Image (tube, rainbow, N blue to C red):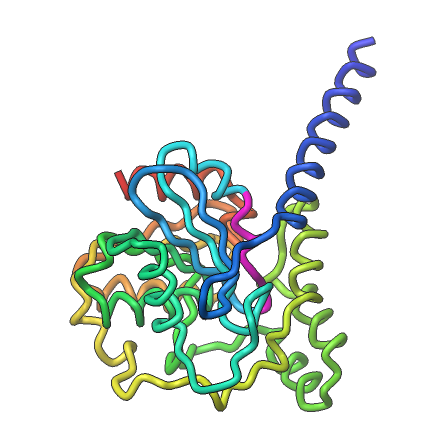
Amino acid sequence: MKRILNAVLVSIVILTVSILQLVAAQQQATKSNTGIAYNLAGEGDLIVFVHGSNLDQRMWFEQNRYFANFAKVLTYDLRGLGSSEAPSETYSDVDDLNHLLDELGESELTLVGLSSGVQVALDFAALNPKKVNKLVLVSPSLNGYTPKENPPYLSELIKALRQRDFDQANEVLLNSEIMSVPMQHEKLVRDMVYASRQWSLRYDLIRQNTDPVISNLGDIETPTLILIGENDVSAVKDLGSLLERELLNADLVTVPNGRHLLNLSSRAIFNKNVHQFIQ
């Protein structure tokens, strides 16, 4: 009888997680005047979450549910990704976020970026220091950083992209450590990767900063929390250490058994660390 009861409880938990992910997948985003898809929930101080490459704002569904209990939470799709409109002229992610904040009447925020979202977060903080109260940099990626050791999947990924075999590129990515998540999140990550237009983005339309942020990390004074998963690739962990050294006001936390998509692999610890930091 006890074994049957345990099995029923496990089934209920799995069903609940599946329903939450289905709701996240079907959530209808609002479009800004500039074509950026976003969701805004909760009341209080604003927290903005920036997703990584080949993903979209659905990756933050657990954080949206948690942080909206005591803060205003903004998640959005970067230009050309998720439900946001593709670029038709020169643009920058910093300008897109600034326009979105202006439209929403927001002027101060805590900014959370994961993976390539860290690049957006640091660029924004460097150019808008008075707007960003705190920074959270998760599993960082940064333009201009050359790792001592490339991730093992990289050469296979580059080969697939050169052949324009995007399905193969997606599979390489999904089978890599970068996209490794607990079983209950695998479908969500697969759906985001296959729905992404990352491989076809017009990179020639991205307006590059004339003064790369990686060369000016020491100018960023914003209180910063760096979160790294213990089981992330060495290149990410090395970059996390560099950011801790170079940023003026940064602390690094390594999450035991954490993976690259830290908010999904270690949800409770991730939420707790971010919550404590922003308080």
Counting from the top left corner in percent of width and height, residue 101 is at 34, 59
Whether 166 is drawn above or below 111: the answer is: below
In the picture, the quarter occupied by the C terminus is top left
Furthest residue toward top: 1
In the image, what residue occupies the spot 35% across and 71% down? 94
In the image, what residue occupies the spot 36% across and 60% down? 103
Magenta highlight range: 54-61
Furthest residue toward front: 33
In the image, what residue occupies the spot 36% across and 63% down? 240
Magenta span: predominant SS is: helix
Name the side, left or right, on which 164 lies relative to 56. Answer: right
Counting from the top left corner in percent of width and height, residue 112 is at 38, 55
In the picture, the quarter occupied by the N terminus is top right
**The stretch drawn in magenta includes residue 56:** yes
Q: Nearer the viewer, residue 209 or 46?
A: 46
Counting from the top left corner in percent of width and height, residue 189 is at 65, 56
In the image, what residue occupies the spot 38% across and 53% down? 48
Whether 109 is drawn above or below 67: the answer is: below
Counting from the top left corner in percent of width and height, residue 194 is at 71, 66
Q: Nearer the viewer, residue 39 or 240?
A: 39
Q: Is residue 273 visible?
A: yes
Name the side, left or right, on which 43 lies relative to 2. Answer: left
Q: Where on the picture, by quarter, is residue 119?
A: bottom left
